[in-house]
Image: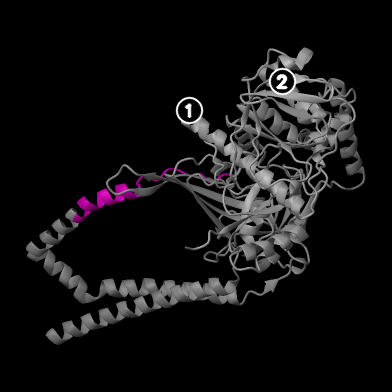
Amino acid sequence: MEDKPSLLIVRKRPLEAAELERQASQLASFDGIDAYQAKLMLNGIGLAILYKGERGVAETLGDMLSGFGAAWMIVDGPPEVASPRLVRGIDVSAHSIVFKTNDAPFLFAGGSRVLAVLGDLGGRLLTKMMRVAARQRQIRLTEDEKYAAIIQSKAVLDLYVLPDAFANVPAAPLAPLRIVLGKWNPSGLGDQASHSARLNLDRLIRLIRKYAGIFRLEMDFGLFQLPGCRNEYSRREEDEARNLHSLSTYGGYIFELYRQQEARGESIAGAKKQSAPPKALKGFSGLAAALGAKASSQPAGDMLPLMPPDEPDLPPPPQIKIPWRRPIFASSDLIAAGVPALYLFLSALRLIATNERLLVVIGAVLQSGVLFVAGAIAMGYGAFHYLRLKRWIENTPTSKVRSLAMGLIEVEGVAVRKYQVISPLTMLPCVYYSVRKYNLDADAAQPSWSLSSVISSGLVPFYLDDDTGRVLVDPTRAKIRPTHTQTVSGPCPLGMVTALSMSENITYVEESIPEGATLYVLGQAVEYREEKPNLVQRVAERLRRLKGNPARLSAYDADGNGAIDADEWEAARRDATDSAIAESLGGGAKAQESHIAIRRPDTAGVPFVIAGSREAKLTFKLRLISAILAFLAFASLCAAVLGWVAAFSLD
């Protein structure tokens, strides 16, 4: 019997592009690790399976991850989980909390280490993340926003009271305390109890945080896929029971991650306990306001923030969309139409065979060789055309951005975003993406996949950067060959879109050009003048960025009430105006600037190519097409000559 493969699971974290490239390239030196897949597994939020195979290889990769500062663990499958103890109520004393469960009461002593897993069984968190991504083309959810989304949904809280040292206890499943929204008696909160089940759960979390020595809150359940952690967003009772078990499995993964980290001597301390009691809540302003824990976004040790830091201040992409319409004829329609078409073709042959006059005319045309000569001329022209393009490309030298000349050029560099574009499937920064959705018609006599919809980033301009400079690329009417393809079928979430793919009858195919990918661009370099925004537009843009950055916006909260009033917003507007004026006076914003851009060549027939491969692959394809057309032209000409010879011999 073969040994079960081991799983190397890593906690993702936000990484700079250069650091991500370095780590991925080092991991790709191992068999079974692809550099692109490694980037997906290392960068972002949540847990991901980096490697599946021999345990020795997994341990070697794990040591490399430790050198990177990443948290990781090795498991042989989903962890064993113990049945949770349902909390029915609480009793609070000066130094402890007694949880009344469906079993025996549980004493939670002050100063204990606590792992809290807050799960969303209603899908509100995922929905909010999708809306933010669709609106801003980036993830802008803070910890506070994630917390508020879960609390206002079908929230379930699992509490794991961790031992003082994992080495002192066996690696056995730990039964969590489970608190279900609205299904426990909040009277133990005393004066803090309210008629709102969500507010009661929020205040209980604050209370636990107050008593805990070390408090770690995990809120990523349902946002990624691990074995045994599938979350079905439905109202069926069997799905709810399965989701609760998945939540326990997710907690088991986190518990095992902490246990293995401590066994390796790595810190799991997390944020320090606050000395001051939490401030009073105003509605659901989020975890930081509830706990008074501003350090939650800067945890110590290896426990990194769950959400990536703010993206660079890039503007949203212009609404340049590639229109897509559902094909008028699906593949099944074409097959169905082929039957009558074949019938008509056979009927036409029968008519020709029985009509002597038609046979004479067709024979005369074929015998004259006109059709073969016309075909030879057309295919010969095509062969010459593609051969000319091949020579044109080969004779175009590869230029550096710093020394670009106007006209047909060839440049190689890395892709850099000009606008905030995020691929919806893998949630990676990119300069171009296209996602095709296929549905399986399982009820048909012969099940087949049909294209359902296509979404695309559109023809959004981006930069090409080499070691000498940066040039703008306008991809309008270009032949774009994406550098990476990701296919996901059924419930295999990698990003937010796939987390909704709960049907085995759905397949997504994403083609993208990630930021930092090496690109080869063949096009025409032209000079253009870029209009700069006026003062009002620059102020509006600064305010838009400020609203999208809660950390910077909170600096204007003078009274500390968690909300920005009219006077505070006016102060922010004044600062934005002063900054824009200072930029203008300092010469940072000229009315117009001359730049060089690469676009489609003006010469007819010259290709505009954006691809990840060098010209060798492109020229080989052109050479092959030219050779095939030349052969067909020669064959057609030979057929015409043979026809003439046959006609002459008959005469």
Q: Considering only vertical position in the picture, is 508 above or below 527?
A: above
In the rendering, at what x and y percent does residue 372 appear? 28, 74
Residue sitting nearer the eye, 172 or 415: 172
- The amino acid marked with disc number 2 is Ile
Q: Position of residue 500 (x, y in %)?
A: 53, 39
Q: Is residue 192 left or right of residue 245?
A: right
The label shown at residue 90 is: 2
Please state the horizontal and vertical placement of residue 156, each as a whole percent of the image. Answer: 63, 29
Q: Is residue 357 above or below residue 120?
A: below
- In the displayed structure, 489 sits above or below 199; it is below
Query: What mark, if any, has residue 71 been given in the picture?
Result: none
Residue 439 image position (x, y, % from top left): 41, 44
Mark 1 or mark 2: whose residue is earlier in sequence: 2
**What is the CA distance from the residue labelled 1 to the residue labelled 2?**
27 Å
Pointer 1 local density, CA inside 10 Å: few below 14, some 14–19, many at least 20: few
Residue that numbered label 1 is attached to: 237
Query: Magenta segment: does it hold 512?
Result: no
Residue under the image location 42 percent in, 73 percent down? 381
Residue 216 against residue 63 in the figure, above or below: above
Location of residue 265 by image quarter: bottom right
Residue 651 visible somewhere in the drawing:
no
In this rendering, would 70 be left or right of 613?
right
Residue at image position (61%, 77%) is: 395
Crowding at label 2, few (<14), some or many (≥20) Cα neighbours within 10 Å?
A: many
Name the secondary structure under disc 2.
strand
Q: Nearer the viewer, residue 523 or 470?
A: 470
